[in-house]
Amino acid sequence: MLIPVILSGGAGTRLWPVSREGHPKPFMKLADGESLLQKTYARAARLADAGEILTVTNREYYFLTRDEFALAVPKNDRRAHFLLEPFGRNTAPAVALAALHVAEHFGRDALMLVLAADHLIADAAAFDEAAGRAAELAGADHLVTFGVVPTGPETGYGYIEAGQPIAGHPTGREVARFVEKPSLEKAREFLAAGRFLWNSGMFCFKAGLILDEMKTFAPAIHAQALACWTAMRAAPPRDPSQLEIPAADFEAMPGISIDYAVMEKSARVAVIPGDFGWNDIGSWDAVRGLATPDADNNRCVGDAIFVGSRNTYAQSSDRVVAAVGTDNLLIIDTPDALLVAHADHAQDVKQVVSRLKADGHEAYRLHRTVARPWGTYTILGEGTRYKIKRIEVKPGASLSLQMHHHRSEHWIVVTGMAKVVNGDREMFIGTNESTYIPAGHRHRLENPGLLTLVMIEVQSGEYLGEDDIVRFQDHYGRV
């Protein structure tokens, strides 16, 4: 049995301001309207031998991830299962816990196909073929990594030097060594040599074998993963399809990649070379390459005008972007942040995120529109002692029963019907009606209808932070 394992955790700081800590790179929509995560799940679900599809992700991303998966496959597909991390600990801990899950439920010989949630693969048929060949090698007790045939001297990727062919396999090669991201000169040497491949960060192996190799080469991770798994089994889950990793045990887990922990040390590693249109979408320059160019090599997603400009990329969801006399610029416009960067410095965008984080600026973490399990809220305006939000609640969904210490709220229904708990009262509020909730009152908002509920919330008070919420009851396990 083949169990796809999707690792969804990276922040994608080089793709700010679209990718942010609260809405990271896997959820980023491409020009076709699909997210990278959506495409990854569809790719996994399409594989002929795929059974359960296991995703390891942060608990905060669970509901958003589930919504993306629902867009990727038919509604009757029930293969999605989750391991929910309290915080990130790199790929080795994630793989270890996924392997324990797979080994217990499907046996130690079950094959894991480990996929990154934020990669793009253009040639689906070629990838399916490579995955089949990787499964053959993994079934013969190899730890298989996917190497991508390079198309140029790329300095942003790690490399794999392919060794001798593996007897009896059409494409498998031994791994001579892993190489860190090289200089441009070295990358050109690798390209000319013809035996170096880009390290894709995708793998295939038996669950039992990766656990055995981890016990040998990364015993601290193996031992702590067992401690986590024991604690998880001792606490029956509310939903068997989503298992929460305990924070106390997980925090003691060393944060290290599966490459460093095992793949660079084991003698059982093999590589499958592939040419399937792989792209890790690691920067805005890579995103630019996905768009269709005009006669001057300008590209855009959204509404853009280019006057006397060349090699410029513009992306905007709300406004017209006009570029006049520009050359080799990246212009990324969002409702609350604008990025203008020279394409040669696309890798340096992560430094903007570091600065914002150090300054305590919310733009590193959240968009103006924020996804929640029940829907979304959008900040329309804010100032001293006030904040105005547009709130959308999905049909049948509800916010938690909650209270605020420092702010009062005024709710006005724009469309739909709201069921409201306000202190000791329960009421229905229709379009163009409102209610006032004083600070300290328990309250809840619910959408009992079949259409999306839209309302305006006006907050006022001495402190308006999102952490001023005391939850008493919640359908989404956030109490």
Image (cartoon, grey):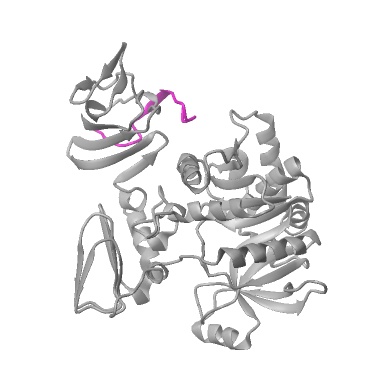
* Residue at 66%, 56% in the rendered image: 113
Which residue sits furthest top?
424
Residue 339 relative to residue 148: left or right = left
Q: Position of residue 351 (x, y in %)?
A: 37, 64
> Is residue 473 visible from the viewing direction of this image?
yes
Along the line of sight, which residue is nearer the eye, 162 or 276? 276
Does the segment drawn in magenta span residue 370? no
The residues colored magenta run 462-479
Along the line of sight, which residue is nearer the eye, 316 or 47? 47
Above-or-below relation of 383 to 205: above
Q: Position of residue 141 (x, y in %)?
A: 80, 61
Q: Position of residue 150 (x, y in %)?
A: 56, 78
Q: Quadrant of residue 423?
A: top left
Along the line of sight, which residue is nearer the eye, 33 or 358? 33
Along the line of sight, which residue is nearer the eye, 121 or 216? 121
State whether the magenta stretch is mostly helix, strand or loop: loop
> Is residue 255 visible from the viewing direction of this image?
no
Does the segment drawn in magenta span residue 470? yes
Q: Position of residue 21 (x, y in %)?
A: 41, 51
Q: Quadrant of residue 386?
A: top left
Residue 180 relative to residue 412: left or right = right
Residue 132 relative to residue 375: left or right = right
* Residue at 47%, 46% in the rendered image: 71
Above-or-below relation of 95 to 290: above
**Count of picture labels:** 0
